[in-house]
Image (cartoon, grey):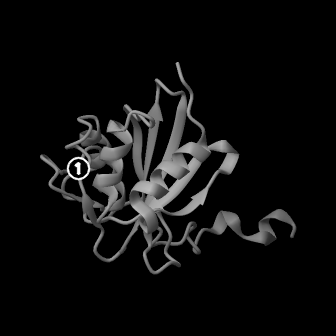
Amino acid sequence: MAQVTNQELIALLSERFGDKITGIDEPYGLLTFHTTKDAIIEVLQFLKEDSLANFNFLTDITAVHYPEKKLGIAVVYHLHSMVKGVRVRVKVFIDAHHPAIPTASTIWNGANWMERETYDFFGVKFEGHPDLRRILNMDDLDVFPMLKQYPLEDPNRVDKKDEYFGR
């Protein structure tokens, strides 16, 4: 089994996609990079089908809400090449007011449920998804619980007042 290094993957991606690949980082040895929602399907397809990369397993799709940023939602893909023994993280930042991105279920069938969960909790609409509906929350829920739109604690809670604890 021939291993592939992060530097080889960076060179491969930079050669193929150029400036569509940005924000390259290696936190804790995990290659992480950003791309755009226009290029994400092409990037994922390339990572799956290229013989050097061979990312044959989609580990996870999720999102992160950054309310302070202009493009406030990051859709995050974790890929694993079981043949090459390497993992990557791909991030795509999208507009939090119109969170839409193409579906990856055309590449990996397993993306179906992961995208439904991401839609359910973050409101990200995966365009072209065969059955995009809530998976865990109630169908008539009109909010997306993982968006940071509300304060973490209720300011009216009396059990959190300092005078009760001698402070």
Q: Residue at x 41, y 65 (%)?
A: 20
Taking the spot 44% from the left edge, 40% from the top edge, the residue there is 79
Q: How many marks?
A: 1
Residue reaching furthest front?
15
In the rendering, at what x and y percent does residue 161 appear?
Answer: 72, 70
The residue identified by callout 1 is: 134
Q: Amino acid at mark 1?
A: Arg
- Placement of the C terminus among the 4 image quadrants: bottom right
Counting from the top left corner in percent of width and height, residue 52 is at 45, 35
Residue 93's place in the image compared with 126, above or below, is below
Across and down, in percent, residue 100 comes to: 26, 66
Q: Quadrant of residue 127?
A: bottom left
| Left or right of residue 139: residue 14 | right
Binning the other alpha carbons within 10 Å of mark 1 as few (below 14), some (14 to 19) or many (20 upward) gives: some
Q: Residue at point 45% right, 68% down?
A: 19
- Left or right side of 40 for 13: right
- The foreground one among 29 and 2 is 2
Is residue 147 something one can see in this rendering?
Answer: no
- Look at the image and tell me whether residue 3 can be seen: yes
Residue 47: x, y in percent? 38, 43
Residue at (29%, 48%) from the top-left corner? 115
Decide which of 147, 47 is in the foreground and name it: 47
- The local secondary structure at tag 1 comes to loop
Q: Is residue 162 left or right of residue 75?
A: right
Indicate left or right for 24 with 16 as reference: right
Q: Nearer the viewer, residue 161 or 41?
A: 41
